[in-house]
Amino acid sequence: MDEEHLRKPLSTSDIVEATEEKKPDWIELEEATTNEEVESQPVSLLQADEIDDLRSRWNAIQIEFVDEPRASVEQADALVAEVMRKIAQMFAEKRATLDEQWTNHDDVSTEDLRVALQRYRSFFHRLLAL
């Protein structure tokens, strides 16, 4: 990344541009379940302390809206982009770990793959619920 990009706050537009530049190289899996089979409790994608911090930051943004509505919207966009980046990074790191294991011909347990697919499924259905 260049220095200018590091100084500029991340926005949701940046995430769209980044995903258009490099498409995932892995094969799309067929949907493993129907909507009726989706677990009732979504899988947590972030640590509890991260979630608490993000909620606190969101509350501060909402409170600021009364005095600075434009700044609040800009901050909300940046916070959403940050969360999306964190989640994308988490998925990318897990995928890289699995790829490395497959490349090294290490055994990847069915349980590890089940958990990975469960996270993808949970996130996928949350995205569609928006």
Image (spheres, rainbow, N blue to C red):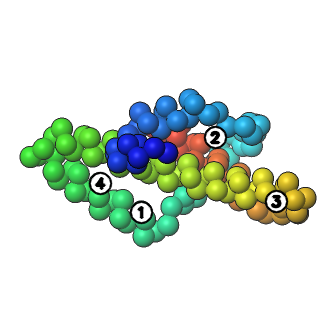
Instruction: For marks 3 and 2, give the one nearer the viewer.
Output: 3
Residue identifier under label 2: 35
What SS does tag 4 mark?
A: helix
The furthest residue to the bottom: 49
Q: Quadrant of residue 93?
A: bottom right
Left or right for 108, reference 86: right
Disc 1 + disc 2, Cβ < 8 Å: no
Category of crowding for the residue at label 1, using alpha-carbon neighbours closer than 10 angstroms: few (below 14), some (14–19), many (at least 20): some
Question: Reading the chain from its start, which is encountered first: label 3 or label 1?
Answer: 1
Report the residue marked by disc 4. Answer: 58
> Are there few (<14), some (14-19), or many (20+) residues within 10 Å of tag 3?
few
CA gap between label 3 and label 1 equals 30 Å
Query: Residue sitting at 62 percent across and 52 percent down?
Result: 91
- Return the x and y of residue 20 as percentages of the image width and height: 56, 29
Q: Nearer the viewer, mark 4 or mark 2?
A: 4
Residue 35 sits in quarter = top right
**Residue at 90 percent of width and 58 percent of height:** 105
Task: Name the kind of residue labelled 4 in the image.
Answer: Trp
Q: Secondary structure at mark 1?
A: helix
Name the N-terminal-most of marks 3 and 2. Answer: 2
When the figure is inspected, residue 127 is found, relative to residue 63, above or below; the finding is above
Image disc number at residue 51: 1
Residue under the point 19% across and 43% down: 71
Q: Amino acid at mark 3?
A: Gln
Please tell me which residue lies in front, 105 or 8.
Answer: 8
Q: Which residue is mark 3?
A: 101
